[in-house]
Amino acid sequence: MNQISRREADDPRSQTLRLPADMPLALDAGVALAPLTIAYQTYGALNADRSNAVLVCHALTGDQHVANENPVTGKPGWWTTMVGPGLPIDTDRFFVICSNVVGGCMGTTGPASINPATGRAWGLDLPLVTIRDMVRAQAMLVDALGIETLFCVVGGSMGGMQVLQWAASYPGRVFSALPIASGARHTSQNIAFHEVGRQAVMADPDWDGGRYAERGLQPTKGLAVARMAAHVTYMSDTALQGRFGRNLQDRAAPTFSFDADFQVESYLRHQGTSFVERFDANSYLYVTRAMDYFDLAADYGGSLARAFAGSRTRFCVTSFTSDWLFPTSESRAVVHALNAGGASVSFVEIATDKGHDSFLLDVPDFLATTRGFVDAAARARGLPERGAR
Amino acid sequence: MNQISRREADDPRSQTLRLPADMPLALDAGVALAPLTIAYQTYGALNADRSNAVLVCHALTGDQHVANENPVTGKPGWWTTMVGPGLPIDTDRFFVICSNVVGGCMGTTGPASINPATGRAWGLDLPLVTIRDMVRAQAMLVDALGIETLFCVVGGSMGGMQVLQWAASYPGRVFSALPIASGARHTSQNIAFHEVGRQAVMADPDWDGGRYAERGLQPTKGLAVARMAAHVTYMSDTALQGRFGRNLQDRAAPTFSFDADFQVESYLRHQGTSFVERFDANSYLYVTRAMDYFDLAADYGGSLARAFAGSRTRFCVTSFTSDWLFPTSESRAVVHALNAGGASVSFVEIATDKGHDSFLLDVPDFLATTRGFVDAAARARGLPERGAR
């Protein structure tokens, strides 16, 4: 993290909900986390009967800055293809909420936040958090905003895990749910890649047992390696080959050295170095771990169908053909469980070569099908038609 | 590397060919490498007309110890499913040769070898090597053994690249060729994963610009991370899920910590720590780089067919359905080029969930088809039938 992002962890340029010490977050790890800060952004206006709220759940290294300029990077929000005026999640119609996850580093309590008990960053003293803990914290925020039922909960990748957890934990509070490029569990291969990333961070002597911040250090090299490894998994083989192939970077011939001869090397190195400017290494450990622990069926006696039994939520499950990190088979398992539980579910597999990252990109078929599902759900919810207000 | 493997780099327990200073290896990097040592193993006996020699080409972290106990690890050779008495590559019939590649660390000249000019390990002073350089060195060994035409050149992964290079560079010297789980180029994704591994090594302060050996250091953490990342790519998602799934390691419940809760984590960590005992970090950089640079078509004006034009070699190209690192499409591209060049080619795609590593494992269909092809080639070569001697 650079100075800007370090400050953001404790004094975010976002709205914040600061819960007092007597309103702790009960963690799956068996301990209570307090006081808790939740940093969030909202877009659009809540309607009179509070029926038009959409909760967007962000992915591993995402944050609450869905559709506004990111205060750390100065770049546009991460989902400006999806969320905004006239877009599928139309901020002219819906009240859109996104909060930074517990364990994150953009203002919600995480390992980079100051532990009030010690005056130092939590570091590894922060208890481990789970996807369910993240969702519990979001529910506290939704409560505080005075919203009983969310019109929609939507998110991709780790965001999709939160969507599924919302539907399972609070079925009566979720009118419609869109888990995208996700699954109901982290697979063995998913865990393996995360473990590689964590070991890369922990191998960096500047990680220093997680106490780097107070010593003015940064495990930038280790975290950059972790990001590089992860980034390869977010793209498809075809997309990499199409975009970079074996093209050389600003040179006519290989240098016979370990320089970044190939464009793909240069690109990856850039992904690594830019990531470490904005993200906290300990947060990376916590949030990857939360994903690893996610196994929704396990919480329901091994039956995913039971997690959704009797659900009246309208589901739209979306996967992408070239996503090998969360392949269609994982989405299909969710669909089967929803069918078995008697839920209302649409299943969309989008043909694209853009890999796991498709949910963040301008993939017209994906945006169009999402728009169609959201519009139909809004109609069922009795919300005014698009452009009617 | 531990003490045993460090010694092996310069004083290998193998046969060695020590080429004098006036017989340098001409490298693609444009420089000459001398003196050159090639460490190799042989199995079986060369027949009277020198027509039964099989050259086995090893993969990235393989070595010459194909079918004997490895002197460093004490484990069996790496291809005891394939090479041995009565096996598909039958050491009762064939004279099998395998040499450690240039750039390796098991006795052939590589960055861990002593540079006679300085008395210190070569380290990064060793010029970069290519797959073609590896093959040129092998040709010098084959010459020294008095063999004009190899009955067969065979190898998987990087070994398969060498097989293709042999067929292109020395078409008259290769009677039959078996590139397995390989391709004629390293793809963008392949390069990306290798770059992650190299950056992991170089991020380790104990790598020390490649001069770790003379300072008594070892970039063990970085190299272990590199190996972990690579190892995930050698297995299929299905194989990982089948073998480890989400099973916990010696515990009944998650510990809510960064311990290796999951079996797959424990397995990967073990892969990392055992690898660094036997392999040199600089060698890892050199050999991965050689693979990255491999693009056989580029040496023939962009036409892979031209690389094999007029070839009289008998090819058997093998791929595995679950190999996502060298997918069937890469093998098929080779087959198309061979067809276009008018070569004799069999193409076998083996259905297995064992991923890229299938070529090293007991995959009966693979071993049976290889046996069939080798036997037919031996008949065409006029060699005695199996068991006839």
Image: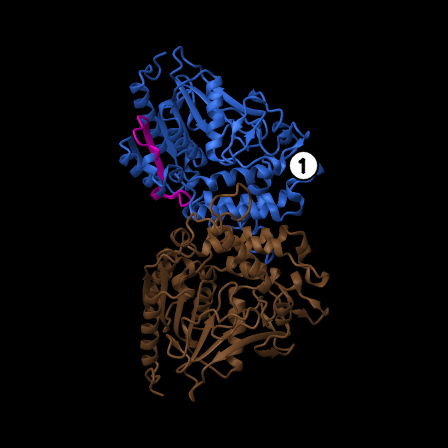
Chain colours: A blue, B brown
The percent position of residue B365, horizontal first and vertical second, equals 32, 66
Q: Residue at x 36, y 59 (%)?
A: B320
* A300 vs A42: above or below: below
Query: Percent position (x, y) of residue A221?
Result: 62, 45
Q: Amino acid at mark 1?
A: Ala
Q: Residue at x 50, y 84 (%)?
A: B146
Quarter of the figure with the C terminus of chain B: bottom left
Does residue A335 appear anywhere in the picture?
Answer: yes
Residue A102 vs residue A301, the one in the foreground: A301
In magenta, the rendered stretch is: A307-329
Q: Is residue B125 magenta-colored?
A: no
Q: Secondary structure at mark 1?
A: helix
B69 or B83, nearer to the observer: B69
Question: Is A308 on the left or on the right of B292, as rendered?
Answer: left
Which residue is labeled 1 in the image? Answer: A213
Q: Is residue A325 magenta?
A: yes
Q: Quadrant of the N terminus of chain B?
A: bottom right
Q: Position of residue B114 (x, y in %)?
A: 67, 70
In this image, B111 relative to A376: left or right?
Answer: right
Question: Which chain hosts label 1?
Answer: A
- Residue A174 spot, x, y in % from top left: 37, 24
Count of numbered tags: 1
Residue A252 appears in view: no
Q: Residue at x 51, y 53 (%)?
A: B266
Q: Classify residue B337 by image quadrant.
A: bottom left
**Where is residue A165, by image quadrant?**
top left
Tell which of B9 and A352 is nearer to you: B9
